[in-house]
Image (cartoon, rainbow, N blue to C red):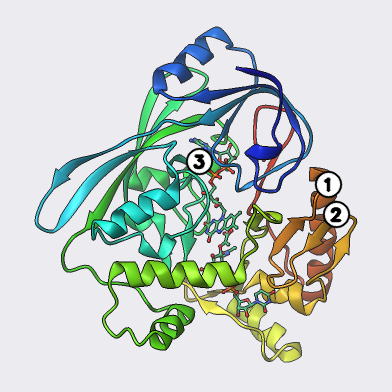
């Protein structure tokens, strides 16, 4: 267990916050022991720290999820059911599936983070969300030590949402294992996203294998998103907002070229927040060491010594400006970590 631990290497924003204590978690039993030994100490569960912003030092103990291992528990001609422990690296799991020709998560290649965090916001990219392949999520309540399994339905997955993000549940359930269903046969590869099609066409690939899709996604992501090892960031800082069709029509009067995507709800469309922020003139802006990325306006960056509050202050200015210009209130996707034991 580390005392007065620097969290700089534990969050992809590279924020130099400290935690009173930090411990590696290698098993569920270890979580239970810590709850027993330190019942009153605030606890923060952390994966790779690729979707958090530390606003200040954390007065409590960080539980760094490192529970490794995976096991195929059922295999038929058509599919496999596999249990993956939460401390596994998400991208490694994707590449394992691709190499073994198990379909379902190839579009989610190169998303940073751990398997145990993937259900938290229902990670998604290039036309696929992790909910499509999740069967159930295994947790332990970090107050009562009770184990609790959430079925896919109980997870209440939505766009960048799950039951684990609700204020009353956040920080409450340690996700230690996730059960997935991946496909061996009759699996429909999803290349609907324009950028994937362009890469495949350029490479003259007509019948893409899972590996081709994963490689296309990796190429696109590397060209668009800053590498946190070089420039601190947490991917998209805000969620893409949903607006009513009537509101879209009003916006189109002033911004006829505004991009939008249809959603399952015919009355709602999704507007790319990156476009709104870009059009409002924020792309590439820098205030001290906090900035808006020069290629992707949805990504806020730490050029070196920004504090969590520097990044949050910039985010607040962007939120106010977007509300002023488009009457849309942006919601952060990133989890703000404050001094208490709950993330926001
Ligand atoms: P952390 O940042 O460690 O934690 C995130 C939150 O989950 C915190 O509130 C934490 O307390 C909680 N938490 C962590 N582990 C557990 C657990 N085991 N049990 C319960 N709660 C837990 N996301 C996408 O969806 N799509 C993308 O395309 C995408 N691209 C990205 C690109 C870049 C460059 C970066 C930096 C991030 C991107 N993200 C994307 C965001 C991020 O990768 C995901 O949200 C990822 O799932 C976070 O995993 P993590 O282990 O790093 O979580
Ligand atoms: N755009 C701009 N200017 C910008 C950025 C984007 O005009 O600076 C426009 C683009 O031209 C495009 C649209 O906005 O028309 C969408 O951009 P992009 O395809 O880059 O996707 P995004 O909406 O910015 C979302 C996810 C990403 C995910 C990609 C690919 C959210 C909040 N973000 O980004 O997820 O990887 O689609 O599916 O939904 C993350 O969650 O951290 C993340 C990176």
Where in the image, quadrant-wise, is ligand 2 located?
bottom right
Q: Position of residue 15 (x, y in %)?
A: 75, 42
Q: CA distance from mark 2 to mark 1?
A: 6 Å
Front residue of 110 and 260: 110
Number of numbered markers: 3
Residue annotated with mark 2: 289
Q: Position of residue 248 (x, y in %)?
A: 64, 81
Mark 3, ligand 1, within 8 Å: the answer is yes
Residue annotated with mark 3: 164
The 10 Å Cα crowd at callout 1, few under 14, some 14 to 19, many 20 or more, is some
In this picture, is 126 found above or below 114? below
In this picture, is 42 found above or below 284? above
The 10 Å Cα crowd at callout 3, few under 14, some 14 to 19, many 20 or more, is many
Query: Is there any visible trace of residue 126 in the rendered image?
Result: no
Front residue of 134 and 97: 97
Residue annotated with mark 1: 305
> Which residue is found at the position 39% from the left and 87% from the top?
201
Q: CA distance from mark 3 to mark 2?
A: 32 Å
């Amino acid at each position: 267990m580390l005392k007065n631990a620097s969290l700089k290497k534990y969050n992809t924003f590279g924020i130099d916050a400290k935690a009173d204590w930090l411990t590696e978690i290698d098993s569920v039993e270890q979580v239970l022991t810590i709850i027993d030994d330190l019942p009153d100490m605030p606890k923060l569960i952390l994966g790779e720290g690729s979707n958090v912003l530390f606003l200040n030092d954390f007065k409590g103990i960080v539980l760094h999820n490192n529970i490794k291992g995976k096991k195929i528990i059922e295999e038929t001609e058509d599919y496999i059911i596999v249990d993956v422990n939460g401390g596994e690296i998400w991208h490694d799991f994707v590449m394992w599936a691709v190499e073994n020709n198990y379909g379902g998560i190839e579009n989610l290649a190169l998303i940073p983070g751990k398997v145990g965090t993937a259900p938290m916001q229902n990670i998604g990219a290039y036309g696929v969300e992790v909910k499509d392949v999740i069967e159930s999520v295994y947790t332990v309540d970090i107050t009562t030590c009770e184990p609790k399994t959430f079925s896919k339905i109980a997870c209440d997955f939505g766009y960048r949402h799950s039951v684990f993000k609700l204020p009353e549940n956040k920080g409450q359930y340690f996700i230690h294992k996730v059960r997935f269903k991946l496909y061996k046969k009759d699996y429909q590869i999803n290349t609907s996203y324009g950028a994937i099609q362009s890469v495949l066409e350029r490479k003259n690939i007509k019948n893409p294998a899972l590996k081709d899709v994963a490689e296309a996604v990796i190429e696109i992501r590397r060209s668009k998103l800053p590498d946190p090892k070089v420039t601190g960031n947490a991917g998209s800082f805000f969620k893409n907002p949903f607006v009513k069709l009537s509101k879209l029509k009003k916006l189109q009067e002033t911004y006829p070229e505004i991009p939008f995507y249809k959603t399952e709800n015919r009355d709602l469309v999704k507007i790319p927040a990156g476009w709104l922020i870009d059009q409002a003139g924020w792309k590439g802006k820098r205030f001290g060491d906090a900035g808006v990325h020069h290629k992707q306006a949805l990504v806020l960056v730490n050029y070196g010594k920004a504090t969590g509050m520097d990044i949050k202050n910039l985010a607040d200015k962007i939120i106010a400006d977007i509300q002023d210009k488009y009457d849309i209130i942006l919601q952060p996707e990133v989890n703000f970590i404050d001094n208490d034991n709950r993330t926001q």
